[in-house]
Each structure stands twice: as C-alpha cells, then as structure tokens.
Image (spheres, rainbow, N blue to C red):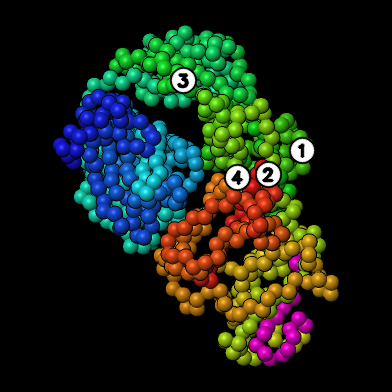
Amino acid sequence: MKGRLMALLCLSFVLFFCQQAWGAGFGTPVLDGSLDACYGTAEATDQSGDGNGNAVMDLLELYVCNDANYWYFYFTINGDIGTSNWGKYVIYIDTTNDANGATSDAWGRSVVVTDPHKPEFGLYTWVDALPYDPSDTQVHAWTGSSWSSAGTLDGVGRSAGSISALEWKIAKTTLGSPTQIWCEVWSTGGGTSDNAQDTINDPAEDWNATDWSSLATLLNSTNVPETAGGDTDPPTVVGASSHPAPHNTIEVEFNEFVDLTTSQVAGNYTVNSGAVTVVSATRGDPDSSKVTLTLGSNLPFGGSNDVLVVNVQDIAGNPIVNNGTTNVACFCLSQVIFEVHMNLHLRTHSIPPIDTVAIEGNVYPLTWDPTCDMYARDNGVPPDVAAGDSIYTVAVDFSRPSDCATGTDTTWVEFEYTHQCSEWEGGHHYYADPGLTCGTGVDTFSVWWADVAPDDYTTKPIDVIFHVDMSSLSPGALDTVGLNGSQYPLNWNVPPTTFLADDGVFPDSFPADDHFAVRVRFPVNTWKWVEYKYLFNSAYECSLAGNRDVFLNDAVYDTVGVNPLILPLAEWEDYCTVGIIETPETRAFKLDQNAPNPFNPVTTFRFTLPKAAHTMLTVYDASGRVVRTLVDERLDQGPHEMSWNGTGEYGSRVASGVYFYELKSEGMRTTRKLVIVY
C-alpha cells in the first residue's frame, strides 16, 4: 500500500504541502486539487489508455488520507476535465468488510459489486459546470434494501491539465466512523444506464469496460485503515452564510471541529468590521465545525459581508491564526424575485384544477432533490404582481460566497422550473455572474418556460413544400412516401398521416419521375423549429440518425401564392449511412452545452466525433441565418473544442440575444441554444 521510499520523500515536503506534520496517511490536505504530501503514496493504480477511448473516463491513481474528523480522497484522470467536462465519477465505500451492502447503483447504472465488499456508501459527482463545489456532488447510503440520500460531500477541489484530479472530503461520522474502509473509484458517462468505463482498484485491472451497455462487475477491494496522529493544525474558516430571513444570524463554518468554550465567545467574532454587533455564538450539535452567530440587527440585502474570527481553538487546543486570510469569510446577501412566464406552455400542458410550478436549483435554499420544495405562485400576493396572468413568481434569499478582497460574487446560480412536480423545462437558466460586485441586493429575473417566448412562434401561416428524390428505391405504384414531423399538422404516427405524391399535380412538377412532393401549411403560433423525416412504406429513413429540420422564418415566408418556403430537393437517406449498426462509437456523437452560457465575451464549444469525418459547427441567429461558421473541415475521431468570441463572419460583435449552434458530421446532426448577454 504505502511505499516506504515515497513516504520518506513526501515527508520532506509535508510542512509545505499539508497542514499536518505527521506521517503519511494522517493530515488535513488543502482541497485545491493538488496532491498534498500527507496522502503518501497511491492506495491503488490503474494503467493509462484503458478508458474505453474517452480521455475523461481513463482513471489513473487513488490516494486516501484522514485527519481526526474527515476522510479525504484524491484521484487522477488521464484527461483535462477543465475542457472535457462531461464525465461523472463515483467512489464506492464498504465500511463493514462483509457481503452486506448495495446490490445496485444509486444512479441506476449497469454496475454491480461482488462479495465480500458491497458498498454501504456511494460518493457521486459531475463536473459539467464551474464553479465546482459540493452542490455538484451526492452522498448516498444503503438502507439494506435501497439507496437513500445522505446529502453532499463536505468539501471538494479539482485541478485541470493533461492529467487532472478531483479531491473530496467527507466527515467520518457520515460514514458511521469506520476504523477502516474498502473502496473503489469508477468513471461513467451521462446516460441513465451507462456502466463503469474505467476503475481504480487494488488489485488493479479488476474490470474495464469495452462498451457502454454491458454489465460492469467491481471488486471494491482497496483496503485503507484509518490512520492515527496528533493534531497540530490551527483551525481555519472555510465559509459564512446567513439563513434564514430575517437574516439576524450568521453560520460560520470551520475546516474541523472547534472547542466548545472558545467557539461560543461572542467577542471572538467581528462582522463587517464591527458595524454589526454579535450578541451570542452557539456551536453546532452534532456538527461541531459550525457556529451560529446571533446578531443585534438584521443584515441588509446588497454588498459583501465579512466575518473575522480570533482566539477560537480546535478540539486539540490549536488557536486560529489571526492573519486576515484563513480566519475570514465573506458572503453576498441578496434577494432575487424569479418570474416564469407559463402561458404558452399551459395552453397545451395545463392540468386542472390547479397548476403547480416550482423552482429547482444548485444554490441553497434551491435544491435539485427533492423537487417542488419551493413553489412559485400566480396568486397576486407579493412578490407576484397579478393573479391569473400565468406569470408565476417566487422570492428567494441567497447567501453566496464572495471574494473578500474585491467584494465580488463567486458563484453561479443555476436553476430550472418544474410543472406539476414532474415535468422539467429540459434546460437550465443562470443567474449571477462570478466576478461582478454583489449588487444592490434585490433583483428581478424573468424568463419564459424553456426559453420559449412569443418570438419563437410564427405570427402568420407558412406553407412549406417538401420534396424528395426516391429514385434510389425505384418505388412502384403501390409504394407510399410519407412525412412525419414535430409540429402540427405533422406528427410522429406510423403509418403516417401526411403523404407525398409523384403525380405531376402541384407542388409535384412531373409525374412518374420518382420525385415526390407535398405542401404543408403550418398555422399561426407554430414553434419555428420543425424536425421531420421521410418514410417509405411506413419505414423511416436514417432510423438511427437524427432528424432533418427546417426553420419557419415568418419574417420572409408565408403562404402558397405569395411566398412559400420551398425546400431543396432531398435525396432519400442523403444524410445517413444505410444499414448503420448502432455501436458505442455511433453513440459517441455528442455536442455539449457551450460553457459558460450565457456568456460574455468568450464561450467554448465541446463535442465528440465517433470517427474522422468532415464536420461543420455553425452558429445561427433566431431567424436561421448563418452568423459564424466555426468549423468546416475534416476532424479526427474523439473529443474537440472550439472557442467563440461572439463575432460574426466579418469580425463585428453580434447583438445580445438567443442564438443556435449546430454540429453536423457524417449524416448526424444536433442543435443547441446559446445566449449572449452584454
């Protein structure tokens, strides 16, 4: 396990890299994604290049250490999770050294663990967005028959680079205070049934995936005994926040448990340079790393608040260092009034007699789970303006970390609305901008459900002429050619209800030339983006590829006889490979959401190609016009990224607003939405 030679080398750097001057395996590392000397040598390793072809799936080394109160895990990834940030990572932990434990995965992945080390705990995380913090993690505990939520990790860190790392912290008490653990790290994809793609375990190479679907069987046999040591570290302040209203309390969080007597002296805390009086201080129970301050007045919204701590000791008697950095925490206190316009959505999704709309999110008091724990109302009671206007409103008080030196916010608020506690919008919204000042404290943020506003719907009928060349199939008199699509009057019924004809009657030009045509009138208030596919004798073209699409530009086109939208003549299956067999590689065609989004001034697109091919990445405005072609060349198989500074083809900056970007390669295509905000 712990190699002697490496341990001796590490010990020479302990004082610099670790807050604990004891042997390898005991200490309090700094959660910054860097490997501190107190971890010692790797508990388990895995060879590089076996992550099923995906760099961010390829795991390398696992390090584990502990101090008096926490377990710490540090593992490396053979790829840059700062740029390829779509991976998900899990640590299974067995605390009982027996065959009791989970027989399934908390995320529903196709993963099992063999005896005797079935896990009692699963630590889960994803790295899809910055800043990376405990809100991007989950802790699940096995109840004997199912998984239950046990909150989030107590602290996290990450590093970027050609070899990147994740670093986690979890309280010993959360795991039941075991004296030793058996664990395994594994990586997985974003699909709901994706299995493990790589593992780190001792012995190494216990199992590695060859595809995304076959069952993964893990051993979970890496044994790590709890390490004892003496605590000589001073405590540090890791955060402060004010919840709930009326904000006359502040919770101060330390990196370790603190002494009862010194932590409860009100005079050891100064708020806003003494402008706010601290009346009392109460240490948490059972979480002795948190202290609640009661204030003599309510904190106002707006600006950055700071808390300075002196004289507080940890349970070993080490006093906090009054250096103005590790004994200070700052936070923004603000109220945001969220409004969601539901009227367009409720036209076809209303559920009488009462429609329920709730807001979910990543920053407390918002949560992703459970759903519907914070409702928006359309009842005319402030902050809602008027009842019955289908604008649902809720006021949310946020206490978010801020930069003490600059007084600026450091946290994105990511959120999404739900309808009837089960129907999600399908995409996230973002509020706040790290790097900006904390603001005046009260703000209103208004969106349309799923970003679908009246501008996204047509204001007049539009006729579209679809025609397709079927000569490759030599259709006979009894064969039929159909058209299915996402917007009325099209549908996805099979057999189809809309048919094309080759009879020489308008819009068909000539009979019996194997060119089939049909005119479709899309009515007023049609969603402007229409997906569609042709069918031959009720069988879809390109059944394993994406759909064709057309943008209903009602600023240019309208009805037949005036200015219909006439599509170019298509060829049957001209955008896919006939007889394609679905493989892990074809499923690897993937376009991530650009990040950041909304953005100003630069954003990054990341995508994955299943094989080398000519590829196009194009940005369009809301009318469907090309704004910028970012890629138009042959690219290699695997992950790619491309940055965009918000300029058009001729170098001028485009206006604020909603845009779309499309990735096309080898007959496959996918589109996403982005937002520019100045």
Image coordinates for residue 575, horizontal then vertical, percent: 56, 74
Q: Residue at x 40, y 44 (%)?
A: 160
Q: Which mark is residue 328?
A: 3
Closer to us: 289 or 626 = 626
What is the quadrant of the N terminus in the image? top left
- Identify the mark at residue 447; answer none if there is no mark: 2
Quickly name the residue at label 1: 387
Q: What residue is drawn where x is 72% and y is 55%?
A: 456
Give the residue at mark 4.
Answer: 601
The first of marks 2 and 1 along the sequence is 1
Do the numbered discs 3 and 2 sit on residues whose CB atoms are within 8 Å? no
Does 47 appear above or below 133?
below
- The kind of residue on which mark 3 rests is Val
Question: Which residue range is magenta in the image?
Answer: 506-524
Query: Image height check: is 527 above or below 28?
Result: below
Crowding around mark 4 (Cα neighbors within 10 Å: few <14, some 14 to 19, many 20+) is some
How far is mark 2 from mark 1, CA to CA? 18 Å
